[in-house]
Amino acid sequence: MIIEMVLLSALAGVAVLFALGVLLSKDNFYSSLFMSAALIFVASVYALFDLQPVFVLIVFIFVGAIGIVTVALAATYRSDPERQFSRLWALPVVITAFVIGFSIYSYNLLNPNVPSSVIEFELINFIPITEPITEYLVLILSLMSLVVLLLLSVLKMGVGGTEN
Amino acid sequence: MLAIDIMSASIIYVASFAILLMGYLAAISSKDVIRLLISLELMFGAVFMALIPLFSIALLANTAFGIAIITIFTSSGELLVLIAAIVTLDRQKKDIHTSAITIGGDRV
């Protein structure tokens, strides 16, 4: 259990470090590469919990398609970005981080008798074979309608761009 | 198969909050839309990470998988629309800086 906890901390920590690289990098190209790496490590946390379908979806669809298009776009429009970050944002960020950290810390102090809920993951029967597949059909239909709506909006933007 | 406890959930939520914070900071510190796109993708990554503890509840496992699928496909679609908007912005304005966008929002 300790090894898994260390592994989870390492994966989450590396993901946060790559996210920090996105923030600190001045080049959009490297920022997009760091972003893709951070998302792959987020997906690796799913793989650590034996949720391989979500890992595949994130890595192949989100990173493999959208992330690579972003990298290509950043490489095409490669320039040093200008910053407009105000240091005044640091104060609410520090306060929020302190409140969240203290709430997590105080939960264990104030609730010492609460057992750590160890519940095994279950990912079964999402696509039932013998039963009616109504939920699965509803999901597929909603995703198809979403794709049609998105394509219509993209087509409208493309037509507007060529007319002007 | 690794089970989740309060400590694991805390690590996941703290990392998710940190990644979301980086995304917010990158979004508000950027002046071009490419960096905005990158920061949005980072924020969606934080959302994906925050979904993990949902899978630990046995009754919600299938629902959580459905939520994850819908989130992944919806966010991918939104980002594709943003990419198309960036290309259109470049074709119309010959500029990808956010300062080039002068129309939009409510007028008060």
Image: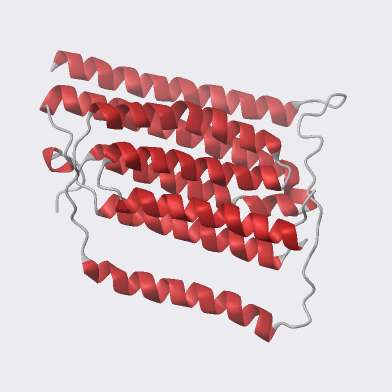
* Total number of numbered discs in the rendering: 0
Measuring from the top left, give residue B85's x and y in whole percent.
27, 29
- Give me the residue at 78% from left, 61% from top: A1
- Give me the residue at 74% from left, 54% from top: B56
Which quadrant of the figure has residue B93?
Answer: top left
Q: Is residue A146 above or below residue A15?
A: above
Q: Is residue B39 above or below residue B82?
A: below
Q: In this view of the protein, which residue sits in the foreground, B41 or B81?
A: B41
- Give me the residue at 53% from left, 79% from top: A102
Specify whether B12 is left or right of A89.
Answer: right
Q: Is residue B29 above or below residue A113?
A: above
Residue A51 seen anywhere in this rendered image of the structure: yes
Residue B85 seen anywhere in this rendered image of the structure: no
Measuring from the top left, give residue B13's x and y in whole percent.
57, 61
Furthest residue toward right: A130
- Give me the residue at 53% from left, 28% from top: A61
Which quadrant of the figure has residue A67?
Answer: top left
Measuring from the top left, give residue A76's x and y in whole percent.
25, 26
Specify whether B59 is left or right of A60.
Answer: right
Specify whether B34 is left or right of A112.
Answer: left
Colouring of the image: secondary structure
Q: Is residue B74 above or below residue A98?
A: above
For the C terminus of chain A, which image quadrant? Answer: top left
Measuring from the top left, give residue A98's x and y in whole percent.
45, 77
Q: In this view of the protein, which residue sits in the foreground, A79 or B101?
A: A79
